[in-house]
Image: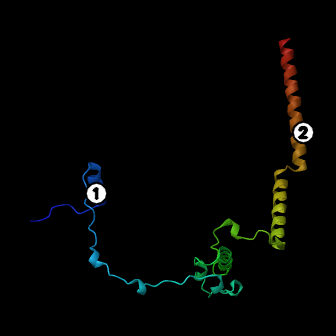
Amino acid sequence: MVDRTPPQTFVGRWSRLKAGEAVAPPEAVPPAAVPDVPVADAIEAPLLTDADMPDVDALDEASDFSGFLSKGVSDGLRRRALDKLFRLPMCGVRDGLNDYDDDYTQLEELGDTVTYQMRQWAEQKAREELARQPAPDELRTTQENEDAATVAGLEAGEASMDEEA
């Protein structure tokens, strides 16, 4: 006889649980399959204390810091060892992606190059402003033209008033 039940999938299990069908518990491993390990053969780590630990000041990158995480080591010594670990150059590598990684207290001087370039920009801006202003001859001619137009307008206005009267 061929088993025609669909394979166990997440959606299939969810659908059966939603419908209220009971799910068979997974097959348990028979107790005989678990090997018996005698208690004497089990490896037990010795409980390390502060006296067993090396001097924190003598630790370097090659030192083993795992002993300081033992339950028998005092919190103060553990903190000093972890502080030493995190201050080592191997742990102090920055990726350069943080804004606060740079030292903004030591600023570079702008130097003569930037000062020279800014002076060039200021002179160029002054030349552009000077080019936009009309020359004094053009200004006088423009003023004379405006005066002539005003006089012509006034004369035309007076002539039209004489005709109406």
Quadrant in which the N terminus appears: bottom left
Say few, some or many: other residues with alpha carbon within 10 Å of mark 2 (under 14 / 14 to 19 / 20 or more): few
Left or right of residue 158: residue 93: left
Label 2 vs 1, first from the N-terminus: 1
Q: In terms of image quadrants, where is residue 63? A: bottom right
Kindly identify which residue carries mark 2.
Answer: 144
Which element type, helix, strand or loop, lies under badge 2?
helix
Name the residue type under label 2: Glu
Where does the image place residue 123, in percent across and percent down from the top left? 84, 62
Front of the two marks 2 and 1:
1
Q: Which residue is mark 1?
A: 13
- Seen as rendered, the residue at the extreme top is 165
Residue 55, percent from left and from top: 69, 86
Towards the viewer: 110 or 38: 38
Residue at the image position 81 percent from the left and 63 percent from the top? 121
Vertical side of 12 occupied by 112: above or below = below
* Residue at mark 2 to residue at mark 1: CA–CA distance: 97 Å
